[in-house]
Image (cartoon, coloured by chain):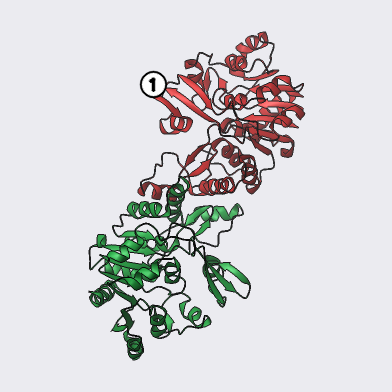
Chain colours: A red, B green
Amino acid sequence: MIAVLAGGVGAAKFLRGLISVIDPSSITVIGNTADDEEFLGLHVSPDLDTVVYTLADAVDPEAGWGIANDTYTALEQAAQLGQETWFKLGDKDLATHLLRTKLLRSGNTLSQATQAVADAFGVTCRLLPMSDDRVRTIVTTDDGDISFQEYFVRRRQEDEVKALKFEGAEQAQPAPGVLDAIKRASGVIIAPSNPLVSIGPILAVPGIREALVDTDAKVAAVSPIIGGRALKGPAAGMLESLGHESSAAGVAKLYEDMLDVLVLDEEDRVLAPDVEALGITPIVTNTIMRDAARRRALAEATLESIS
Amino acid sequence: MIAVLAGGVGAAKFLRGLISVIDPSSITVIGNTADDEEFLGLHVSPDLDTVVYTLADAVDPEAGWGIANDTYTALEQAAQLGQETWFKLGDKDLATHLLRTKLLRSGNTLSQATQAVADAFGVTCRLLPMSDDRVRTIVTTDDGDISFQEYFVRRRQEDEVKALKFEGAEQAQPAPGVLDAIKRASGVIIAPSNPLVSIGPILAVPGIREALVDTDAKVAAVSPIIGGRALKGPAAGMLESLGHESSAAGVAKLYEDMLDVLVLDEEDRVLAPDVEALGITPIVTNTIMRDAARRRALAEATLESIS
């Protein structure tokens, strides 16, 4: 059994490689839900959906999120009715949020709704939200505090991030099965996701970080930073503005208390000694998942490092 | 000020004629909400929406309901995810239900949500649900009790109707403004809608029938039955199976206690004496609203009868 901590696009790609190597039903994905937001009155879980759509091979291959060949008829009409529509929900995508919201409104937990969505897409990995409780990433900018999606989508990550808060995290409990999945895992992988706003909120739920520190299983992270930059998203600038090092070594430091292995890119081979100096085993390989073969090779190298 | 009791398609067509004759802002529409239903977790108000779409000239002209040139991408995807999709919600149509549901879930009343939807479509008639409380038409068939939409849409009105119940009606209150609109109206019109399942539930909300009986203003109904048949929908068979007369005279009897005028079709001229015998003034005219001129002429004749 393997447990994977996952954000959105990068994690989803990594998981797609992983299920080509090991039985999906042996994988428990613990997903970030601090990016969840309500749009058009529907509960949207962007990171969980990106994982589901990718694993179901339904994802828009260009964007890396959303459903392939989706249309925006409902959204355009909502705009005509005066609704805010900066978050791009496609028509097919809406069916997911309608299902989730219906289940939540009728008394199901987010775990149950997530399971139903995964089942509906035929995803056989076990997919758990980090918590059934409401946790929301709040980004402090020069213009004040804004929600993560406001920062990420509406304002296109153009604000300098002054601080991050995970509202509700202190009171949140790990979703049922999360701690158990970590405790029983033969290995844990932290996917190549933004360490601050994708993995950070998961680790902020009381008990999860502790479980990762305590487990006897090896914990490996795949660095989402290559040559000082993120392939996608604002991780690099955010690391810097929050006083961290925007490098694979900087990522290793953030996970230092729990990490056994850091998988880093060939381009960052020079950083391997810095990682090793933290007591973390560096595994240098090609981490850019540009095709199925590369995704598979990265998954194999990562699995081998924790076996 | 004119008050109009309205069901769906027939009423909407009639109202479209009416607003071509008098200022829409002088019209208060009191709509049937006993056909409301939850689909895909959204609150759908089919009769109110048909009125709004028609008055906004957005309605699908073939069907008489729904939005013109709509697509069904979200619904088809919902079917793929295992959801029940026998109620045909188009993508554009979804935007309406998303808006209404969002407003209801955030604490607004159905009146407030209805006003917001009407405003969003630029409808300047005052549109009121009969009640903010939940009233649901239950149809008794040989297979037991089913919801109105189950009878009407899913089972295509093929069941014999053994009985009708308006669940919740006894405890319901008229929506704010409904009784006042009737009391202050210079004339009241009962639109050409099914008297049992479109107008019936409105009259079943305590206080509304009494207000129509008590008002000094003239009350006119336009018969939805022409030559013993309904132009659309199951009214004729339903009238018969429930022991009423499927004719304009039968409609007059159902409204006898409150009606001053019945507008009936040329085809039913022979029934005028029967209507007159009930103490109701028959107005014989062409009631088939096949084009704008006919809609307008019917509205003018009806208005004249109550002026």
Disc 1: which residue = A142
Picture coordinates of residue A174, whole percent (x, y): 65, 31
Return the residue nearer the eye: B156 or A298: B156
Q: Position of residue B219 (x, y in %)?
A: 31, 74
Quadrant of the image containing the C terminus of chain B: bottom left
The front one of B136 and A149 is B136
Q: Quadrant of residue A190?
A: top right
Q: Residue at x 23, y 63 (%)?
A: B23
Mark 1: secondary structure: loop
Amino acid at pointer 1: Asp
B225 sits to left or right of A167: left
Left or right of B190 on screen, residue A220: right
Q: Quadrant of residue B16?
A: bottom left
Rendered location of residue B189, percent (x, y): 32, 72
Along the line of sight, which residue is nearer the eye, B28 or B83?
B28
Q: Residue at x 55, y 59 (%)?
A: B85
